[in-house]
Amino acid sequence: MAPSAPDRVAVVSDVHGNVTAYRAVLDDIARRGITAIVNLGDIVGKGPRGAEATELTRRRCIASVRGNWETYVAGPGEPFDEASAWWRAELTAGHRAWLTDLPGAIDLLMSGRRIRLVHASAVDEFTRVRRDHDEAEFAGMFANTAFTADAVVLGRGSSGEGSSAVSGLSGPFVISASEAAGAPGAWALAGLEPTVVLYGDIHHAYLEIADGRTLGNVGSVGNPLDEPVAAYAVLEGVLDGGAPAPFSIRHVRLPYDVEAEIAAASVAGMPQLELYAIELRTAIHRGRHAELGLTAP
């Protein structure tokens, strides 16, 4: 009997209203035959089509977490500048409610590895952990905290109260009722921490392994700051597999039509267009544009 195909989960993050890049990534994921997608937040802000990006996420992703820009743009506080007010006005009340109600973390068990997915850190969606972090910051990413206690749990099992059956992977699986990974908070109660953590936020993809733990950033779909192409990651292994089994994390880089996205932002009359255009073309953060003398034609 031939072995069953491994389960694959695509992990996307930091779309930032860049629908041109998002559609290119979603199409690439579909071409690979992957049907399960999770989103690590910052769906909105910085780009012109946050509402459309939100709708695509609701339709195509099986689970999502809340990023800092969901709180900035869709949260109850006052917009902090004219651009934030523009990005908020583009969203409906329903979009804002959905975005701000997203959980802080997603937990799953794959090929004997406890995997946690967050936007920025185990502290909250705002605390940034850069690629050049120190040992304490590395260790902190694997901590069970109040922020991760209500993590959505992704795995196979029988749907029950508080769970929703969805289709994907190599068969049906459920959210918040995994028989293998346990209920939300089960790892902390058992004195267990994740062994793999993937996150977004910094727009810079990398992978680091130390002391038997793996920390990785999946990069940014819509506002990459390491190279000017869309980035995402693919997890492959045995979902709900408690025993060691083949497992991989694959980073994917995907060119897309940057100029078409800049044109869409221009037509929409989006504020901060020049900053956005330079970032998309160069992958250099806007905070360095003046220093480097960068301008957009």
Image (cartoon, rainbow, N blue to C red):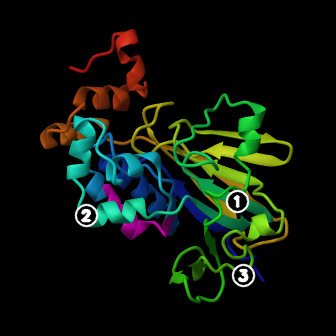
Q: Nearer the viewer, residue 92 or 276?
A: 92
Dominant secondary structure (helix, strand or loop) of the stretch shown in magenta: helix
- Can residue 55 be seen? no
Residue at the image position 75 percent from the left and 79 percent from the top:
2
Separation of marks 3 and 1 at Cα, in angstroms: 15 Å
Residue holding disc 1: 115
- Say left or right for 117 vs 78: right
Residue at the image position 57 percent from the left and 40 percent from the top:
127
Q: Quadrant of residue 46?
A: top left
Tell me where residue 93 appears, x and y as whole percent: 25, 63
| Amino acid of disc 3 | Glu
- Can residue 1 be seen? yes
Tell me where residue 259 appears, x and y as whole percent: 26, 35
Q: Nearer the viewer, residue 277 or 272?
A: 272
Check residue 59 for magenta coloring.
Answer: yes
- Say left or right for 142 vs 8: right
Circle 1 residues within 10 Å: few <14, some 14–19, many ≥20:
many
Q: Secondary structure at mark 1?
A: strand
Residue at the image position 24 percent from the left and 31 percent from the top:
272
Residue holding disc 2: 93
Residue holding disc 3: 179
Q: Nearer the viewer, mark 3 or mark 2?
A: 2
| Residue extending farthest front | 77
Q: Which region shows up in magenta?
A: 53-63
Which quadrant of the rendered structure holds the C terminus? top left
Circle 3 residues within 10 Å: few <14, some 14–19, many ≥20:
some
Q: Secondary structure at mark 3?
A: loop
Mark 3–mark 2 CB contact (< 8 Å):
no
- Say left or right for 12 vs 135: left
Looking at the image, is 205 positioned above or below residue 249? above
- Please tell me which of labels 3 and 2 falls first in the chain: 2
